Image (cartoon, helix red, strand yellow):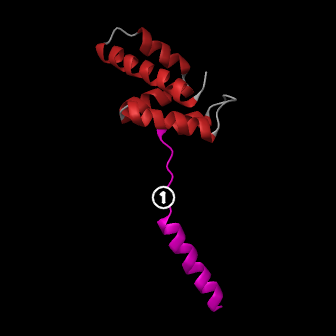
Amino acid sequence: MKRTYVAAVASALVLSFAAPVFAGPIESACLRSDRKQANRQVCGCIQQVADMTLRGADQRKAASFFKDPDRAQKVKMSKSASDDAFWSRYQAFGEQAEAYCSIG
């Protein structure tokens, strides 16, 4: 009984010091996609690049493209200044993700 208690306390301490792992919006969308290259390593890498290059709102918008690829085309073709600015950031993100994560 005492050993079980000690093991439980030790496990709780180890788990409390472990860094929590949270998937960002792009990683989550990537993992849920039906793309055959979508795995934790690739999707995690893409999320790391997104964290370095895109704000939170941009990440959520980009993540929506995994579920609705037509939305990406609509944003790209939009005449809105904010969509144009987003698209420039999104293209830069895509180029960096391709280079950094060796995808493509």
Residue 88 placed where, x, y %? 38, 17
**Most prominent secondary structure in the magenta stretch?**
helix
Q: Residue at x 67, y 30 (%)?
A: 37
Query: Which of the 4 image quadrants contains residue 61?
Result: top left
Residue, far bottom: 2
The answer to whether residue 31 is above or below residue 80 is below
x and y percent of residue 95 in the render? 48, 20
Q: Nearer the viewer, residue 70 or 28?
A: 28
Q: Residue furthest right?
A: 36
Q: Is residue 24 above or below residue 98?
A: below
Label 1 sits on residue:
19
* Residue name at image x 64 percent, y 85 percent: 4
Which amino acid type is marked by label 1? Ala
**Displayed quadrant of residue 87:** top left
Q: Residue at x 64, y 88 (%)?
A: 3
In the image, the segment drawn in magenta is 1-25
Label 1 SS: loop
Q: Position of residue 27 (x, y in %)?
A: 53, 38
Q: Residue at x 56, y 78 (%)?
A: 10
